[in-house]
Amino acid sequence: MVCAISRSDFIISKSNTTQKRKHLKRKIFQYDRMTDEIWASYALKTDELIIKSDLHRSSASLNSQSDINSLNNSLEQILRTATNSIIPYKWSSNSHIENKPKSLVTTHQHLKQLNGVILALWQSNRDKNIWPSQKKWTTYIDLMNNIITFYELDPITWPSTLDSLNFQTTKSHINQLLKFVYNKCKYEETEWKRDKIKFYSEQHNNDLIDNQSRMLNSVLNKEKCHITLDYIMVTDQDALYISTDPADIERIATNHY
């Protein structure tokens, strides 16, 4: 029996690409673990690679933009090589990233929006009487009122126009609203993390009895790899035929391996 490779193994649909992206691993360099000795090793490694590539003599031949670009590309490659071999790193997998609760995502959005309002006020100039435009300030008022309504807070009376007379009072109200949303965001994030820790702790304890395979994969930081056979070529009494039935593919592949 011969296994055939489908063209879908090379031309992947968007949904399959998205699924594969979730299982990609990213290398994260841990610069906080760097010491003087490691930095010295990094410098020696880069010098070694530069001399090996004979780049320390290239400055005299930089006569065009193309020569400069070529030297820059070579230096980038040297730095990349030295970084991969010297600087400590760890692997991070997107498969372990979990979606945050909708309420926490909403609170984060409100916090970001209020920070935008505060930033606009900081950019105002009371001495030169420069304030957000009437249209912009009306947009801010609608935004803050929606946040107040969402959390069922006491209503705030906002001035129709922002000026030097009401600036301090208005800024104080916005800061109070910002502080409330910030504290709520921190509380919900803490609760979410606590619930995650509790869930995985209980799952780990249960896996000791119910799912030892998953427990070992978790302890060893091991991920399962899967392949998909769209069709399979089968030899049956000296005759070749191609089967696309998923049940037949699973049965024949299992018997073969």
Image (tube, grey):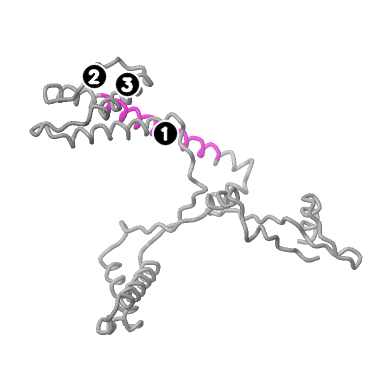
Q: Earlier in the sequence, mark 1 or mark 3?
A: 1
Which residue: 34% across, 27% down?
184
Instruction: Tell me the amino acid under the disc marked 1.
Output: Val
Q: Give the quadrant of residue 163.
A: top left
Closer to us: 96 or 5: 5
Q: Earlier in the sequence, mark 2 or mark 1?
A: 1
User: What's the CA distance linking mark 2 and mark 3?
Assistant: 9 Å
Q: Give the quadrant of residue 48.
A: bottom left
User: What's the CA distance linking mark 1 and mark 3?
Assistant: 19 Å
Dominant secondary-structure state across the stretch colored magenta: helix
Residue 55 place in picture, x, y as percent: 31, 81
**Residue located farthest toward the left when viewing the structure as drawn:** 127
Q: Give the quadrant of residue 176.
A: top left
Instruction: Tell me the amino acid under the disc marked 3.
Output: Asn
Residue labelled with disc 1? 105
Q: Earlier in the sequence, mark 2 or mark 3?
A: 3
Q: Are marks 2 and 3 in contact (CB under 8 Å)?
A: yes
Disc 1 versus disc 3: nearer the observer: 3
Residue labelled with disc 3? 145
> What's the magenta region?
177-203
Which residue: 64% across, 40% down?
210
Closer to us: 54 or 59: 59
Which residue: 71% across, 56% down?
229
Say which mark, if any, is on residue 158: 2
Say which mark, if any, is on residue 96: none
Instruction: Tell me the amino acid under the disc marked 2.
Output: Trp
Q: Is residue 56 above or below residue 182?
A: below
Disc 2 versus disc 1: nearer the observer: 2
Residue 154 place in picture, x, y as percent: 30, 15
